[in-house]
Amino acid sequence: MSIQILMPALSPTMEEGKLAKWLVKEGDEVHSGDILAEIETDKATMEFEAVDEGRIGKLLVAEGTEGVKVNQPIATLLGGDEKASPARPSPRSPLEGEPSSRSELGGGMAKAGPTPPPKAAKAASTLPQGDGVGELSDPEIPEGTEMVTMTVREALRDAMAEEMRRDDTVFLMGEEVAQYQGAYKVSQGLLEEFGARRVIDTPITEHGFAGLGVGAAFAGLRPIVEFMTWNFAMQAIDQIINSAGKTHYMSGGQMRAAIVFRGPNGPAARVGAQHSQDYSSWYSHVPGIKVIAPYFAADAKGLLKAAIRDPNPVIFLENEIAYGRSFPVPKLDDFVLPIGKARVVKPGRDVTLVAHSICVGLILEAAEKLAVEGIDAEIVDLRTLRPLDTATVIESVKKTNRLVTVEQGWPICSIGSEICSQVVEQAFDYLDAPPIKVTGKDVPMPYAANLEKLAIPHVEDVVAAVKVVCYRS
Amino acid sequence: MSEPSKAETAGVRDNSKASTPVALKQFYADMLLIRRFEEKAGQLYGMGLIGGFCHLYIGQEAVVVGMTAAKREGDQVITAYREHGHMLACGMDPKMVMSELTGRASGYSKGKGGSMHMFSAEKHFYGGHGIVGAQVPLGTGLAFANKYRGNDNVSITYFGDGAANQGQVYEAFNMAELWKLPVVYVIENNQYAMGTSVERSSAETHFYKRGSSFNIPGEQVDGMDAVAVHAAGQKAIAWCRAGNGPTILEMKTYRYRGHSMSDPAKYRSRDEVTAVREKRDPIEHLAQNLIAQKLASEDDLKAIDKETRAVVNAAAEYATASPEPDPAELYTDVLV
Ligand SMILES: Cc1ncc(C[n+]2csc(CCOP(=O)(O)OP(=O)(O)O)c2C)c(N)n1
Ligand SMILES: [Mg+2]
């Protein structure tokens, strides 16, 4: 009797991985807990342990194979000693099922992420587009500049490394940022380059180290404080708002906190209500701080560099699911972007779609679907949420006369609420239809795969909303 | 402990109710249930049937089994996200726990909580919390309610070595001692908080001393020995029940698996893990004692294992066959 050993899912977002190395060979006896193989995910190399006992039959996937799908059989295990494990589940139990139902279940989990990553090539063609309006503008990218494809994760790391090289007062502090290289591997290599003085692992004491960072900033240092995720920054929100955000004002301009608070924000995959929420509108509500939420790697890099140089407290909202997406980034010595400037990613005539962070990917996908139906959408990536570049949005609405905002956060007092309010105040006469906000549902994030899917916006929701404002439904 | 412990001076720490032979066999069965359940959960995670973060309790079973045997009906339990073992020890149904892990309507939270967030009002299990340290003031509040009502129930509040550095823990300690609240703080020192060892995160690594500046007595316990945990738990709970205020138990324990299913655990050596597994395993250790003291035979233990596997397999089958929650559940339970 033989059991199939399947490619395991080793992280909430893993869909496939590389079978880096087999640590057993055909014919080996294995016991539960023995390490069978090393498997590389996008974040880490993991050891894969045996659960059942028995003898390795066939190795079905050669070591070094990339892109092995989760739940694909990778080896067979010949029946163990029945006495040793009397109640071992039979391979035909409904649990393990047929391969087809298995992959369906596996796929179900993988699909729990809000959107499948757009193809890099598509994103590439939409990147170097024209500016919106207003005084701020992105720096000229000289003719012939090489574009390097990198992940958002790498772009963020490069931004920090470049700023740390040019300014000794910049340091990085947070949980698992140094030795572990970041819980989401954003600070990879920084400890090695900058040493323990400047890349600092903290205890799990968010309120304490956020406050300590603000104090260090008062004293003239430029801390980058990483929150493992923004969920945990709620422990520290008093120091962020009351200390970092208000001291410049309260001191009549004498004292400042040039500090960046950064980390992944927004729904992740299947981690439930306390670990899966969007803080965009929370921080955007507060005067005295700036809030940035980029999507593309180039924006992540250029804006993080700007945030580190900014004399004010800056909230930098990243996204776990977008970390692994790849986009072109201009290879320039010092690529810094203006804070407070939205970008028209794709011009269009019929409707303005506005989003930030991962939802930019969503509206780009929606725009492609809409194009097929003859609707030409203009895509605005806000990039910065405070100060909010309403001028670019209003300019766009004056042209398209229709507006749909998209975000993962809750609908009440959301970023979309603010944009709709500004547009109604400043461009009411240009609107041909009431604007629509597409948002996360007004509930804490559920864990169950089907409910989670219902709780966050999808491409179809955007398409449906656009049809309503275009009176096409 | 450096300060003389108030518990010792008060003389309530007698050892009269030592674990009986029957209890020992039950300890074995309870620990084994947790181990097999967690192994199965790990397997289901690998198959994509459990999503998100899934923190396994393998290696730490003696802590919760010993403590649970020391408490009585009505005492409350609260802990963090590594809580599958706590729930099984409380007598919660493995089928419903596993169903919550798979996100099904038949789970303890109707599929809406997941691995980290389960509760049982019936069993006085107050969760299942995802924010490191948050359960410590909450558990202190459960104790406050006991005192307020004038009953003599005790709150058993578990947290990790990493959580022990959160500021709110000390705010809670101060109030607990100030108001003499009946809470046993059980610090599960498994030596790591994610990838950070205790030595790299803590100025004072003897967690039982962490109450010293609030005059809370503390004791270090071999958390790999269910009998030792049980004895210490009985003393501590009696101290609290008698109205003496809070107490701290530092359980020296170890987790065998990564922090969660997605942790490659490169911060410690394979040898370190193997050494603990081979020399200090709480289940093996108790099995050897049971056999040496002739309290159980090899066959008895095999029978327990067989029964346990059957329970766990049934739970897994139930949890994968149950339907997902009805879509309408998305909007229920937001407010009362
Ligand atoms: C406030 C907060 N910060 C960070 C995290 C991320 N996190 C989850 S568990 C964990 C480690 C906790 O370690 P410990 O308290 O020792 O418990 P153990 O996991 O060892 O049981 C961290 C940093 C979190 N959930 N909440
Ligand atoms: Mg720990």
Image: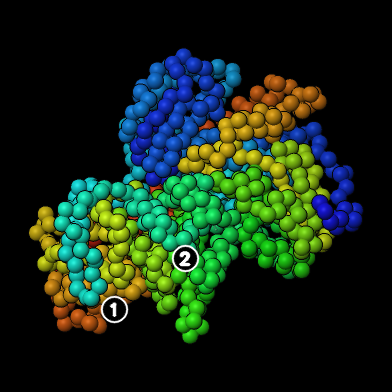
Quarter location, residue A344: bottom left
Q: In the rendered view of the protein, which quadrant contains the C terminus of chain A?
A: bottom left
Instruction: Give the label on residue A156, or none.
Output: none
Q: In the rendered view of the protein, which quadrant contains the N terminus of chain A?
A: top left
Q: Residue B104's spot in the image, x, y percent?
A: 45, 46
Residue type at tag 2: Arg
Seen in the image, is A43 located left or right of residue B175?
left
- The vertical placement of B247 against B179, above or below, is above
Residue at which label 2 appears: A222
Secondary structure beneath label 1? helix
Residue type at tag 1: Ser
- The vertical placement of A198 against A179, above or below, is below
Residue in front for this viewpoint, A324 or A269: A324
Which chain is indicated by disc 2?
A
Q: Earlier in the sequence, mark 1 or mark 2?
A: 2
Is there any visible trace of residue A81 in the rendered image? yes
Secondary structure beneath label 2? strand
Seen in the image, is B297 located left or right of residue B318?
right
Disc 2 under 8 Å from ligand 1? The reply is: no
- At a point 68% along the width and 41% down the height, the residue shown is B253
Which chain is indicated by disc 1?
A
- The vertical placement of B320 against B238, above or below, is above
- At a point 73% along the width and 57% down the height, the residue shown is B210
**Direction left: furthest residue:** A374
Residue at which label 1 appears: A421
Q: Residue A80's spot in the image, x, y percent?
A: 52, 18
